[in-house]
Amino acid sequence: MGDSMMQYRKTGPYRYIQTEEIEQDILQSGSAILHDCYPKFQDGDINTFEYIGFAYLMGANGLQANFDKAFCFLQAAAQGGSIPAQHFLADCYAYGIGVPEDPETAQNYYRLSAQSPVEEIRQAALQQLERLQNTQM
């Protein structure tokens, strides 16, 4: 961490993360784990985006809960192939949590998370896909 100019990292359509603000949040968190994650965040590591995203979502590791920041991180993780992040975004779009309800986008993310090797995630995604398809009939 250190000299940061006002930099932004694009995480999806119309969503950006202000890196200086994230750096401050991580420093203020007092979390050694998050501090160690920061260089990986700068490198665009998908697992780090997922970890920081869920930390923001739950207000964990000394970070204040912040849905907007969580969503940005999880969107980047989902685009990089994180199945838990894909499933989270699918739920957001299916139920209009923090974003406008968008069944088509939800179905796309559920289809991705249905590829999970974890049976519970795969089954939950398939059930949600079926629910959405029945709703649209």
Image (cartoon, helix red, strand yellow):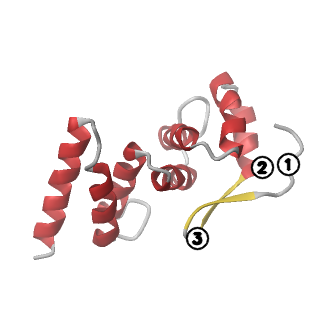
Crowding around mark 3 (Cα neighbors within 10 Å: few <14, some 14 to 19, many 20+) is few
Assess disc 2: are there few (<14), some (14-19) or many (≥20) residues with their C-alpha within 10 Å of its C-alpha. Answer: some
Could you say whether the residue bearing mark 3 is in a helix, strand or loop?
A: loop
- Numbered disc 2: secondary structure: helix
The amino acid on which the numbered mark 1 sits, given as a three-letter code, is Ser
Q: Nearer the viewer, residue 81 or 48?
A: 81
Q: Nearer the viewer, residue 72 or 123?
A: 123
**Residue hosting label 2:** 20
Q: Give the farthest residue toward the right.
A: 3
Image x and y of residue 56, in percent = 54, 42
Q: Residue at x 67, y 38 (%)?
A: 40
Q: Is residue 73 left or right of residue 16?
A: left
Q: Amino acid at mark 3?
A: Tyr
Instruction: Indicate left or right for 113 with 57 as reference.
Output: left
Question: Quadrant location of the N terminus?
Answer: top right
* Label located before the other in sequence (1 or 2): 1
Residue 41 horizontal/vertical position (percent): 66, 42
Q: CA distance from mark 3 to mark 1?
A: 22 Å
Q: Tell me the kind of residue under disc 2.
A: Glu
Q: Which residue is mark 3?
A: 14
Viewer-nearest residue: 122 or 20 = 122
**Residue 106 position in % (x across, y down):** 31, 63
82, above or below 98, in the image: above
* Mark found first going from the N terminus, 2 or 3: 3
Q: Which mark is residue 4?
A: 1
Residue 120: name its quadrant: top left
Above or below, 20 against 12 in this view is: above
The residue located at (64%, 47%) in the rendering is 44
Q: Is residue 87 left or right of residue 57?
A: left
Q: Nearer the viewer, residue 14 or 59?
A: 14
